[in-house]
Structures are given as structure tokens and as C-alpha cells.
Amino acid sequence: MGKILLLRRKPLVVLACALAAALMFYVVNYPYAATASATKRQLPIYCVQRDQKMVSISFDAAWGNEDTQQLIDILGQYDVTATFFVVGAWVDKYPESVKALADAGHEVMNHSDSHAHMSQLSSDQIVADLNACNDKIEAVTGVRPTLVRPPYGEYDDHVISTIRSMGMEPIQWDVDSLDWKDLPASEITQRVVSKVQPGSIVLFHNAALHTPEALPGIIETLLQDGYTFVPISQIILSGECGTDYTIDHTGRQCPC
């Protein structure tokens, strides 16, 4: 009887050992699998690996136009060039402001034509939407945009791959001012200056209540800390993804 029990236990022991080995393999290799999966995702650029203290500030313009000229004046006072991502419908409403931005030397880039949720659009619809906005910006400024910020900061693999198939680069941010929440100027300032690092891209909005009040202090603090302000097209690395640069799982663009 004891031999029969021993023989019956053998398959169970073998099975238990196999399961333990499989579990150990999973535990050891899961971090690698997770990293490999993350790197396969199509990601926009959130920030850039830079040794120099360079930073880009950007504004999304989709709705109001109360303070655009004020922002231009403040940036001009410090000789700072920024990147403005504008919606095509905003260009329709305020072409004079779009021209003023371009005339002041700022980059005017694409924020979609109608501020739609791009992940809900087909690739053909995304191309049509972005080209419509590009056409409007180019008609006013004479320059066709090369950068895109997807509305709401929303994207998936097909959104990013479609944007890049157009020869454009999708841009996010790594420092969010949260100015759209109407935070006090002091809180906006503290959020931004405490989070900026070399290669950061900062997100602001035009028509945000306290951004004009916060902006001078932010610029002065970062200038005193040795930062140089450049538009996004000058902070990102040029070349071909995978050959000249990579984008890691956090969205940081890094040289190869």
C-alpha cells in the first residue's frame, strides 16, 4: 500500500516542481517583460535628455483669447520664445492673434482642428483633421506646423503612429502648471519651478486666470537658476527615431 501511495505522489511532486519553476521564471522575468511591453508602445515626446539647462514653455490655445497679447508682451519683456499649440477653430476666430504670435517670433503649432478626442477617430480622420489645422495656420503665418499636441493629452498607438506618418512629431509635457484649474499665481509658480529639470517641456494655457500673473516670476526664477528658454522645435532632438534617438518608457527623448 505504501508503494502505491509513493507512486501516486510522484506525478504530483513533478507537477508541483514544474509549477514552482514556472512561477520563479515569471517572477524573475516579469520586470523585463513589463519593460519590453512598455518600450513597444508608441509614445509622444514628454521631455528631452539634455545636459544643458534648457527648458521649453508651451501654451495650448483652444477657447478664449483674453490674454494672448499680454502673454506676448510678458514673453517679449524677457526675450523668451515659446511654442503655442492652437486649435484650427481658434485660428478661425482669432487670426490676428495667430499672426501676432508668429510676428513676435513664437512657434505656432497644431492642437487639432476641432479639439476632438483623436483616439476615437480613424487614421484617415486624424490626417484630415490635422491637415485642416495646418492649412489654417500656414495661411496666416506662412509656416506649416511640424509639431502636434493631441487634444486633452489623449492618445493611443494609432494616434501617435498616424501623426508620425505625416512627418510630424507628437508633443506632451513633463511639467503641468495646472493653470486651467485657476490656481493662485504663487501655487502655479511653485509647481513649475520645483518640477523643471534640463529638457523639460512646461504646459500652460492662454486664457487661464492667473497665468499672466505667475509667468514673470517663473521666468525670472529659472533664468536666475541658469536656464535658457528655447521653443520646442529647438529642444527636441532631430533625426530618426531608433537611429538618432530613442523615446524611453517615460516619454523622455534620448540620443542614441
Image (cartoon, helix red, strand yellow):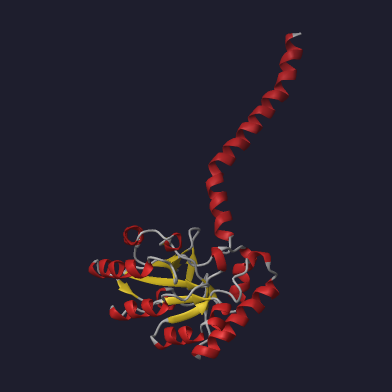
What x and y, as percent, mark residue 85?
49, 75
Q: Quadrant of residue 154?
A: bottom right
Q: What's the residue at 34%, 66% (across, down)? A: 198
Query: Is 119 in front, or is 95?
Result: 95
Left or right: 52 as drawn, with respect to 245: left
What x and y, as percent, mark residue 230?
36, 76
What x and y, as percent, mark residue 141?
49, 89
Q: Is residue 45 above or below residue 24?
A: below
What x and y, as percent, mark residue 120?
67, 65
Residue found farthest to the top: 1
Q: Is residue 205 above or below residue 135?
A: above
In which quadrant will I find the C terminus? bottom left
Q: Quadrant of residue 176?
A: bottom left
In which quadrant will I find the N terminus? top right
Please state the total of marks drawn on the protein image: 0
Residue found farthest to the front: 66
Residue found farthest to the left: 224
Query: Is 228 in front, or is 212?
Result: 212
Q: Is residue 60 above or below residue 178?
A: below
Query: Is 198 in front, or is 12?
Result: 198
Q: What's the residue at 59%, 41% (across, down)? A: 26
Q: What's the residue at 30%, 66% (across, down)? A: 218
